[in-house]
Image (tube, rainbow, N blue to C red):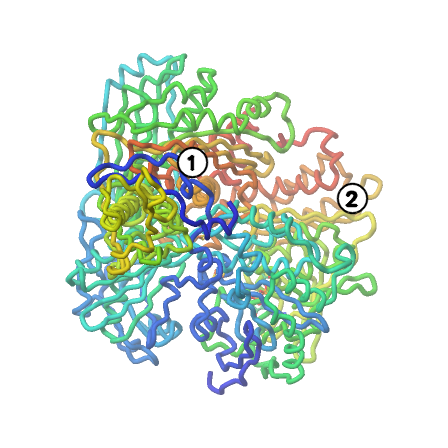
Amino acid sequence: MEDSPRPAAFILNRDDVSTSWPAERMLLDFLRQERRLTGTKEGCREGECGACTVLLGKLEGESLRYRPVNSCLLPMGEVAGAHVVTIEGLNGEGLTPVQQALVDAGAVQCGFCTPGIVVALTGYFVNADRWEAQEAVSSLDGNLCRCTGYLSMKRAVSSLCSALQPPWKNSRDVSPAMEARLEGLVQCGLLPGYFLDIPRRLTLLREQGEHVLPFDPRESTPVAGGTDFFLQHRADDGRPKLFFLSSREDLRGIHIHDGVCRIGAATTVEEMVRSEVLAAILPHVKEHLGLFGTTAIRARATVGGNLVNASPAADVAIILLALGATVGLAEGKKRRQVALKDFFKGYKLLDKAPDEWVEWVQFPLPSRNAAFHFEKVSRRPRGDVAGVNSAILLEVDGGVIRHAHLSVGGVAPVPFYLAETVKFLEGSELTLEVVSEAAAVAQGEISPISDVRGSADYKRLLLRQLVLAHFLTLYPSLAGKGCLHGAP
Amino acid sequence: MSKKEIYAVKGLSVPETPASAQEPKPWKQTQMVGKGIPRVDAYERVSGTAVYPSDVLLPDMIYGAVLRCPHPHAQVKKVDVEAASKMPGVRAVITGDTPEARVEWTYSKEARSSLFDPHCRFEGEPVAAVAAETPYQAEDALRAIRVEYDVLPFVVDERDALKENAPSVHGAGNVLKTEKYERGQVDRGFREADVVLEENYRTECQLHTPMELHGCVAKWDGDRLTLWESTQGVYAVQAEVAEVLKLPLSKVRVVGHYMGGGFGSKLKAGKYTVIAALLAKKSARPVKLFLTREETYLAVGNRPPNNMRLKAGVKKDGTLTALDFSCTGTGGAYPSGGTSLVDWLVRDLYKCPNVRTECTDIAIHTGPARPFRAPGHPQGAWVLEQMMDALAEAIKMDPVELRLKNIPNFSQGKEGNPPYSSTGLKQCLEEGAKAFQWKVARSKALAPGETGRIKRGVGMASCLWVVGGGWPPSTVILKLFPDGSLNLNMGASDIGTGTKTVMALVAAEELGIPLGKIEIEHADTGTTQYATPSGGSKTVPTEAPTVRAAAISVKQQLLEMASKELKLDAASLVFQEGSIAPAKDPSKSVKITDLSELKKRGVVVGIGYRGPNPENKAIIPFAAQFCEVEVNTKTGEVKILRFVSTNDSGRVMDRLTYDSQVIGGITMGIGLAMTEYRVLDRDQTGRMLNRNWHDYKLPTALDVPLEMTSLPVDREDSQANSVGAKGLGEPVTIPTAPAIANAVYNATGIRITETPISPERLCRLLAEKRKEG
Ligand SMILES: Cc1cc2nc3c(=O)[nH]c(=O)nc-3n(C[C@H](O)[C@H](O)[C@H](O)COP(=O)(O)OP(=O)(O)OC[C@H]3O[C@@H](n4cnc5c(N)ncnc54)[C@H](O)[C@@H]3O)c2cc1C
Ligand code: FES
Ligand code: FES
């Protein structure tokens, strides 16, 4: 970098740290090379294994939130003003209950994955209001282990969950205040005592404003979660400087206004999963987006990134297409809107000028009698990019489909809106014959190619099955009303 | 046993001490061995303080990186390193033109090559290497190297390699060798059969992908080279590096205390090891060279893909009359066992007088194979165990029953037909079926009227592993200090299987010393004793008897000391609770820590050597696995609901590490069955398309069932060795994939003869079946 940037100040475990490592470099390298903290391991540098998991603690308003993240995809620019917790930052005099439970259950073999697992699990206990074994195991969805077969880890988790109770009160209804939570966690031994002082120290950092990186948005490449970006680009290969969208609070959040739901471009998938606003509109959003990536990836991946990266099977894009979404774009002071289905123009080709940013995406609130569904089939059921995914919104009145949106991913160069099929569906009666025919119409619209995720024929077959699955899930009584051609 | 007790057991009673030159008797009741005791090095592993080779940071250390051939087949014409050498931070660049780097490399004895072979026969062959101050600078320098290639025609699929006009890998035809085996009269056997079935099968190429990457840190002190290498065997690495660099063994020290998994892919040194040493020499700096994940997909081995055919004959009563097996496979560009041991189960698992096998190893332009957990066996099991399932159905017999009918008590495949030292296959089958509730589960799954979108099924498979007894050589040294604490010194690596823990338990058992007082030095050619690599499921049966022998030597010396001190014949003395006393008069005891000669000498050194195995005995572990699945007949998705694995690996040395092996093995087998397979661009570029965990999927915690049961058939094999244990690490993964395939068949009536059992394949087969039906 030609001009040395202002040093980024943050807290690393117990220590205040100030570094002028380039903002584009990965935290993992800083930890292992610069700080010689080798408990955080490198397994892949692509967000797939979780060996590099650390907790990233950030002040959000008055509260402090820790998220497990993959340090191999976390640029130094994102740690300014934050508390970074590595395995070394959890170690105390003895073992923490998480570590002890893993040891007792024999959940450690070669041990290379273990620090990441300790950190990820600790992250679960830090975040969850109630501690439940199944959820705790799910929080390990991004941690590969080639040795143990995971069973011992699950045993460790269940013994932990039955031995430990969250020490805070009101755990049924409200989540405890930050101080109470930290105190409780320290009291259980899950976190070392120094955590109690972290909110104060972070507030101090914030007041000093040291963490604000002086980037000019116009001359920079925007990076949101970086979960696509850093897989495609070497960290410091001479591109224009990076601008980290996470610093733009105004680009985050989910709000309802005037019959539309607007999601800020820098809103993360995890925020969508946790959003009560969204859950009220899409009751199954947690399940649907739970199929997206891993816990650590969901904590970073954003809506805007998903749309702009425009992978043909992008999950968020597919869901939003079926909600009839519109994208809000900005360039300097200029603003414009474009329907999401028109936003995708060709393989990785967008209706977006190079300097234009996505500010938000919004969709009209579905009517009361509308039903929404999302299906995703991949080679591995969880934490895999879809082979084919599909979403549908249906409004049925008096046995007739009044209104529909249907999208499909993985079968065209772009996340695909099935316009012809929608046209066919709207106004048709809701019968099995119609569904079957709709699946046939859809075949005419798509152009799948064979790749590692499956052959073109298979993707065609899958689309057919997913269309059927949509209708059978939303209207189970259809199944009784005659035989679907080709169904078992 | 509570944690306190484990770490503070005081003066345990110890087993009888044999007089020197006498064989120790099998342990009767054990105090430490066989319990579920957490790892002795658990703290280091769970706190991140364990230093793995990839964590080693040395003063002044720089970083190495390797430029690899991007083509499956090419001739390097010119490597221009001019620009790269001048880049910031670059300290060394080496290529095939560098005189010191012109060394021979042996992928296999049959086909020699060189470190930077200009004739690149697979994507990922090293072409040049650099070392620079930072990994970023090293990567930049690689990009600045200009290579001119003559890109040559390739063949990356063994099914294409035998076609006429197929590009040749080594100048002649692509058949490396064909191995044949025959016993009895196969044709007559088929004539005697009531039912004869024949089927083709295929297993895809699976990759090891251990969590820790392959690589090392290399450092020279004068003419002495030290390597911190992520390896399964420090002495194997030492031998190879010494040979390649023409150094005396004593000048190569290899250290590998912790390592993050290998599964067979880290049994030897890699080219990267030698490259790191050369870069370190050239730059006069310590060099760290670890591969990227992508490089490990290309260049450090795999489980070969195999195409197999089996014809089998059975009588109505379940007697197998003939097996005729043939297979082709490929270990890639250099001979590396593309078909080795694939036919072993057909030869040896079930009683059958008439067996014929033929295996053809083929060369193609891909990275050479390396042994992968139970080489050849999961492939062979995929065939044999599905066939057994089909035969059972054809003669209307329960598949467990059919197997029980055909259990041999000697090895039919091995020279001289040696009897098994022990065989627990019957127990595995019976106890497994009982624990799984096989009969009930099967009749439920078979019940008519299942019409829903989701169908259930159960399946099982069994296996043996070709060698389970370990073998010499191995040397272990125990040092007992005057305060009663012990140092255990062995060369073996603990690759995660718990070797350190098991060996500490053996020493604790034999000497009555609490675990907390035992410290282990291991996996260092400079300071620890010779051992062969940890692999082949042989580490426990090799090292544990050696540790026991060393412990007995310590005890014998202590008895001698006590005999002098008490002025009594050593043979009349026994150990009791940390003391030695006359057997007849326990009150006249002397505490071991009070022995004056021990104090004077400062240490008692017990040396243990691994003795030979019993003659004319086959020491073989056995296993059976049962599983239940749920199949979504709309999408072809398979959910595995539960697994039961029963293993006969002799004595259970430690229940926690034992179960961990079993469950881990099943999980790896689930990977082979469901999601793991190499994808090559067979027609266009010949390159690998899924060279990362994003596109090559391992099972996660959410893909394996919560209900997995490990049920040891805990029978010590006193004929095998002095601790009674057989190998375990490999049999655990052999029957998994066919057990799943059999369960899927049970659920759907569809035989999946090719891995993976992917939604794609199953969805297509289900659709075809619907069309037919
Ligand atoms: C392990 C792993 C698993 C994954 N699993 C899934 C999955 O299951 N489903 C799925 O759909 N995806 C998956 N992904 C892909 C990725 O996580 C998503 O596409 C994610 O939404 C990208 O968001 P991001 O914020 O990380 O994007 P970034 O990487 O930050 O950005 C992506 C691109 O968009 C640009 N950009 C970002 N925000 C804006 C903006 N507001 N305006 C203009 N340009 C912008 C960036 O410049 C960059 O070019 C996975 C990725 C990984 C590493
Ligand atoms: S190193 Fe694998 S996820 Fe980061
Ligand atoms: S213990 Fe080896 S990878 Fe998990």
Coordinates of residue B656 in the picture (x, y in percent): 46, 44
| Residues at marks 2 and 1 touching, judged by CB atoms closer than 8 Å | no
Residue density around tag 2, few if under 14, some if 14–19, many if 20 or more, within 10 Å: many
Q: Is residue A360 above or below residue B736?
A: below
Residue at 57%, 60% in the rendered image:
A297
Say if disc 2 is inside 8 Å of ligand 1. no
Which residue position is annotated with label 2?
A401
User: In this view of the protein, which residue sits in the foreground, A11 or B596?
Assistant: B596
Left-right relation of B1 to A183: left
> Is residue B411 at all visible to an observer of this figure?
yes
Mark 2 is on which residue type?
A: Ile
Seen at 72% across and 55% down, the residue is A323
Q: Which kind of residue does numbered mark 1 sit on?
A: Glu
- Give the secondary structure at mark 1: loop
* Image location (x, y in percent) of residue B81: 27, 74
Look at the image and tell me in which quarter the C terminus of chain A lies.
top right
Q: Is residue A121 left or right of residue A239?
A: right
Which residue carries the number 1 mark? B754
